[in-house]
Amino acid sequence: MNLERIPNEEKLSLCRKYYLGGFAFLPFLWLVNVVWFFKEAFVKPAYTEQPQIKTYVKRSALGLLLWVAVLTTWISIFQHFRAQWGEVADYISFTIPLGTP
């Protein structure tokens, strides 16, 4: 998508939609929001919608970092303790590894 062709009001609307969509357990939308709108928020000359876009981009980046931290922590804990958790870990696993723990 080329943001150069979109009016500023629609940019703000799209940025807000991606920001709110990230709360639906879709942190990838926050990543897209940060990547697409970073230049609009921090590099382009000032315009009336820019402060709001900047707020959404900052919050999207914060939410994304929080998700990455939580997910990384969970993956590390699960990988480390999976064998000790026995059947419970098998029930919450997508695939069950073969062999001995």
Image (cartoon, rainbow, N blue to C red):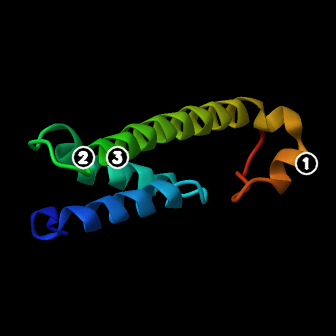
> In the depicted view, which residue is nearer to us: 19 or 7?
7
Q: Tell whether 26 sits left or right of 12.
A: right
x and y percentages locating residue 101 in the rendered image: 77, 37
x and y percentages locating residue 96 in the rendered image: 73, 55
Measure how far apart labels 3 and 2 are at the Cα level. Answer: 5 Å
Residue type of the residue flagged with mark 2: Gln
Residue type of the residue flagged with mark 3: Gln
User: Which of label 1 and label 3 is nearer to you?
Assistant: 3
Q: Tell whether 23 sits left or right of 99.
A: left
Compare marks 1 and 2 and give the one earlier in the sequence.
2
> In the depicted view, which residue is nearer to us: 23 or 50?
50
Query: Do tag 3 and tag 2 residues touch (Cβ < 8 Å)?
Result: yes
Residue 50 disc label: 2
Residue topped by disc 1: 87
- Image quadrant occupied by the N terminus: bottom left
What residue is at 24 percent from the left and 46 percent from the top?
50
What residue is at 60 percent from the left and 39 percent from the top?
71
Residue type of the residue flagged with mark 1: Glu
x and y percentages locating residue 73 in the rendered image: 63, 30
